[in-house]
Image (tube, rainbow, N blue to C red):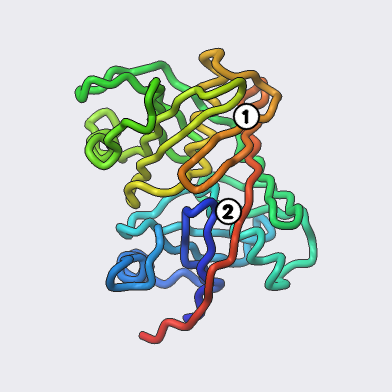
């Protein structure tokens, strides 16, 4: 099995072009391991689609399947373009959260992530108030005045596996650091603390617009541990994400 390792702002995956094997969850657990495997936040399988130009399936480091990955889909776009599976810069990719429209601009990729569904705030039994958001996958956004002081490895799992979210959830901690500018840290469902989360950045920006912290229809800079994403939330809460995607290495897995 040939793989290419790529990352979007440090959120790294092993990408395989081809059919998804039945043991994909097990393979992701094995090869995502950073001490005994290759090391990644998960595995993403790319294929052709009868509904779009390409398809993607995402498996987290713990083997669970995700519906969508914002950093991953940018990598998919660069993968298929630069490995000459297509000669077009405008693509569509089928995901478990719907078909996404993509524009490739050199090293940068812009993705129409669809509408972010922002719900009413809820008080969790861990003493934090969060805003649930769906961007094809579930998020819990918590605003704070001191995001760097958040003990993410302690509180992250408690939110991810909270009874309020039966299917588990991604947890984002966000601080407003400027005009239309946010600082975000993330605990990803199934992968733990990661350098970045594209859907999480969209969710956080959408909540910031809903609460009046940021303006709609204007780029919002979201600073993550791995770098910066530009998110534009339209008045109908459609989220447009722009960011980079990088190649790391490639190799063969012999089972």
- The label nearer to you, 2 versus 1, is 1
Q: Residue furthest top?
A: 212
Q: Where is residue 106 drawn, in percent x and y? A: 75, 57
The residue located at (62%, 33%) in the rendering is 239
- Disc 1 is placed on an element classified as strand
Residue 99: x and y, percent?
A: 62, 47
Can you identify the residue that label 2 sits on?
73
Is residue 142 placed above or below 57 in the rendered structure? above
Q: Quadrant of the C terminus?
A: bottom left
Disc 2/disc 1 C-alpha distance (Å): 20 Å
How packed is label 2: few (under 14 Cα within 10 Å), some, or many (20 or more)? many
Q: Quadrant of residue 107?
A: bottom right
Vertical arrangement, residue 160 with respect to residue 121, above or below: below
Q: Say which label, 2 or 1, has the lower sequence index.
A: 2
Q: Is residue 57 left or right of residue 150?
A: right
Residue 157, quarter of the rendered image: top left
Percent x, y for residue 216? 66, 21
Q: Is residue 243 left or right of residue 66?
A: right
């Amino acid at each position: 099995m040939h793989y290419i390792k790529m990352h979007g702002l440090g959120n790294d995956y092993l990408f395989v072009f081809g059919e998804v094997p039945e043991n994909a969850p097990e393979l992701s657990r094995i090869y995502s391991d950073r001490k005994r495997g290759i090391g990644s936040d998960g595995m993403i399988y790319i294929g052709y689609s009868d509904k779009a130009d390409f398809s993607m399936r995402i498996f987290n480091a713990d083997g669970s399947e995700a519906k969508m990955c914002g950093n991953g889909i940018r990598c998919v776009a660069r993968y298929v373009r630069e490995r000459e599976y297509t000669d077009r810069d405008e693509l569509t990719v089928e995901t478990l959260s719907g078909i996404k429209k993509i524009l490739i601009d050199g090293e940068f990729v812009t993705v129409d992530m669809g509408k972010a569904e922002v719900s009413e705030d809820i008080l969790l039994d861990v003493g934090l108030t969060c805003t649930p958001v769906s961007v094809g996958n579930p998020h819990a956004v918590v605003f704070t005045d001191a995001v760097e002081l958040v003990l993410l490895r302690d509180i992250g799992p408690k939110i991810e596996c909270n009874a309020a979210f039966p299917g588990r959830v991604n947890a984002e901690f966000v601080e407003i650091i400027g005009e239309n500018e946010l600082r975000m840290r993330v605990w990803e469902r199934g992968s733990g603390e990661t350098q970045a989360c594209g859907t999480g950045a969209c969710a956080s920006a959408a909540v910031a617009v809903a609460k009046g912290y940021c303006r709609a229809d204007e780029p919002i800079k979201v600073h993550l541990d791995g770098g910066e994403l530009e998110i534009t939330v339209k008045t109908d809460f459609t989220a447009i994400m722009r960011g980079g995607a990088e190649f790391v290495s490639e190799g063969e897995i012999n089972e």
